[in-house]
Image (cartoon, rainbow, N blue to C red):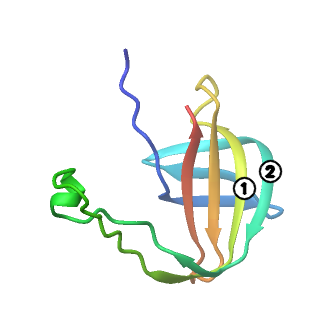
Amino acid sequence: MRSVQTILEEQVEVARTAGDPEMFLLRGRLYVVRSVLARWREPGGWRWSGPARAAGPAAAGAGSGAVAVIHSVPVQLADRQLWRVEAAAGMSARVEVFDLCRDVAAGPPRWTATLVEE
């Protein structure tokens, strides 16, 4: 069985044609976009950061009646543009599905890629 490395929101460099991503560089490999499956925009605003596990007996499952405290804080997020694409790193490589995200507020714009299907 081969080992699969998960790609979660890694920064990438993207080349675009007519607004849509055409290719992107991820982990030193050039991926060519074969098709754009969807595109959408997520408005910015206040969202809550992900929960963090609290240390102590409640987090370890010890003690009766103990309640774990989950800390999260509001964060200000900018608008984001997203493209769900099918892409491959070479002509004979397997086609994979990625979400390419463009952070509109960053200057220059910051791109990230997330592997959707393996």
> Tag 1 or tag 2, which sits nearer the N-term?
2
Residue 23's spot in the image, x, y percent? Answer: 65, 50
Q: Going by the picture, which residue comes out furthest to the front?
A: 65
Residue 85's spot in the image, x, y percent? Answer: 71, 45
Quarter of the image with the C terminus is top right
Quadrant assignment, res 3: top left
Quadrant assignment, res 102: bottom right
What numbered label is drawn on residue 83?
A: 1
Residue 16's spot in the image, x, y percent? Answer: 72, 60
Along the viewing direction, whichever of 82 and 94 lies nearer the viewer: 82
Q: Do the residues labelled 2 and 1 touch (CB within 8 Å)?
A: yes
Along the viewing direction, whichever of 29 and 82 lies nearer the viewer: 82
Which residue is depicted at the point 51% across and 75% down?
48
Q: Which amino acid does label 1 sit on?
A: Trp
Tell whether 59 sits left or right of 11.
Answer: left
Along the viewing direction, whichever of 21 and 4 lies nearer the viewer: 4
Tell whether 62 sits left or right of 72.
Answer: left
Along the viewing direction, whichever of 12 and 8 lies nearer the viewer: 8
Which residue is depicted at the point 22% across and 59% down?
58
Tag 2 secondary structure: strand
Tag 1 secondary structure: strand
Q: With respect to residue 10, does 92 lie above or below?
A: above
Q: With respect to residue 102, does 98 lie above or below?
A: above
